[in-house]
Amino acid sequence: MDFEEKKKKLLDQLNKATGINFDITDSDLSDDETLNKLKEMIVHFNVIDSKTGLFRLYMRGEIAYSDASASLHRFHINEEGIRHVFYLESQHDYTKESVSLLKSLLPESNDVVVEVDSKHIALVICFETAPDADEITQAANSYLDMLESEAFTSFKISYGKSIDSFKDLPSAYKDALIAMQIGNTFNSNGRIYSYEDMGLGRLLFNVPKKEVEAYLNKHINAEVLSQIDEETLNLIDAFFANDLSLAETARKMFIHRNTLIYRLDKFADLTGYDVRKFSDAITVKISLMLYNYINSQK
């Protein structure tokens, strides 16, 4: 991120804190000095008036650790302790009932429900001991199920690793945020995204756009992929998810095996790749993921 981008981000934060639009037209300060002054102004105007406010400002990087740690005692927050950050996303604006339900599910005073914006909520959950993968998945499912059954709102949820210090809260929040972005890009039909389980998606998410386009042009270009109907793409995804098994894919997708073979043959005729062959399947899998990545950037 260059100076202009950093400056714009800080000016936007200052606007949120004060309700005033600021602009820098003339200054004798260096770029670093300008950014530091803007950060000081944000800290000054971002009055921390609640525990939730403290968590929101700190984990989003709007105040420094030194400023956040100074308020820990005031809100009876322990510096150490195992915490896990969950990031929830709703397709539509959620209601206040959703927030109330989450708070009722988290009676512990150390747990925090943070309203990030109209479609996103962050949960900071405390654990006595480090939770394993099953415990985290179970907790994530319980939040989603409750919101869907009682608030009639469908959410997705993402998360990273557990942390053992308040200081690491921004990195945990960032991992959860990135996990949501990667999940939405490469597995938009998913419900739960773990940063540690993003696998190939994490790798491809950091590939420069120029390299993505070069790969697609060499193998299956975007124009060809755009001609493939959604039903066929869903069948291809299911075929990959079922370890390239024709019988299992046909059973899971409720179609006849010959119908599936016909669809795969049509895909091979169009693209030149037969996904029943392992090497071709790898190329198609990566190409489809990169195609989704390119489209998500538009």
Image (spheres, rainbow, N blue to C red):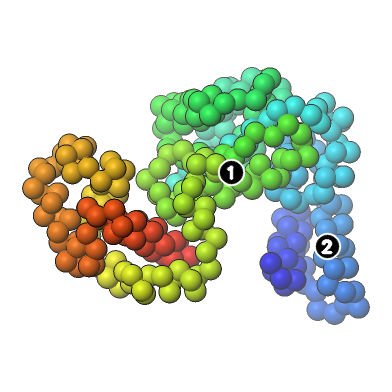
Q: How would you rate the neighbour count of disc 1 (Cα within 10 Å): few for under 14, some for 14-19, many for 20 or more?
A: many
Q: Are marks 2 and 1 in contact (CB under 8 Å)?
A: no
Residue located at (16% from left, 66% from top): 269
- Disc number for residue 296: none
Q: Quadrant of residue 164?
A: top right
Q: Quadrant of residue 219?
A: bottom left
Return the residue at label 1. 176
Q: Nearer the viewer, residue 136 or 9?
A: 136
Return the residue at label 2. 38
Q: Quadrant of residue 48?
A: top right
Q: Is residue 179 above or below residue 18?
A: above
Asked whether residue 147 appears in the rendered view, the answer is: no
Q: Nearer the viewer, residue 205 or 181?
A: 205
Q: Position of residue 123 (x, y in %)?
A: 61, 34
State left or right for residue 86 relative to residue 192.
right
Q: Nearer the viewer, residue 219 or 232?
A: 219
State left or right for residue 95 relative to residue 78.
left
State left or right for residue 122 relative to residue 238.
right
Residue located at (50% from left, 29% from top): 137
At label 2, the amino acid type is Leu
- Please tell me whether mark 1 sits on a helix, a strand or a loop: helix
Q: Position of residue 246 (x, y in %)?
A: 18, 44
Which is closer to the viewer, label 2 or label 1?
1
State left or right for residue 67 relative to residue 15.
right
For the N terminus, which image quadrant? bottom right
Q: Is residue 95 above or below residue 233?
A: above
Q: Position of residue 107 (x, y in %)?
A: 64, 19
Q: How would you rate the neighbour count of disc 2 (Cα within 10 Å): few for under 14, some for 14-19, many for 20 or more?
A: some
Q: Is residue 216 above or below residue 47?
A: below
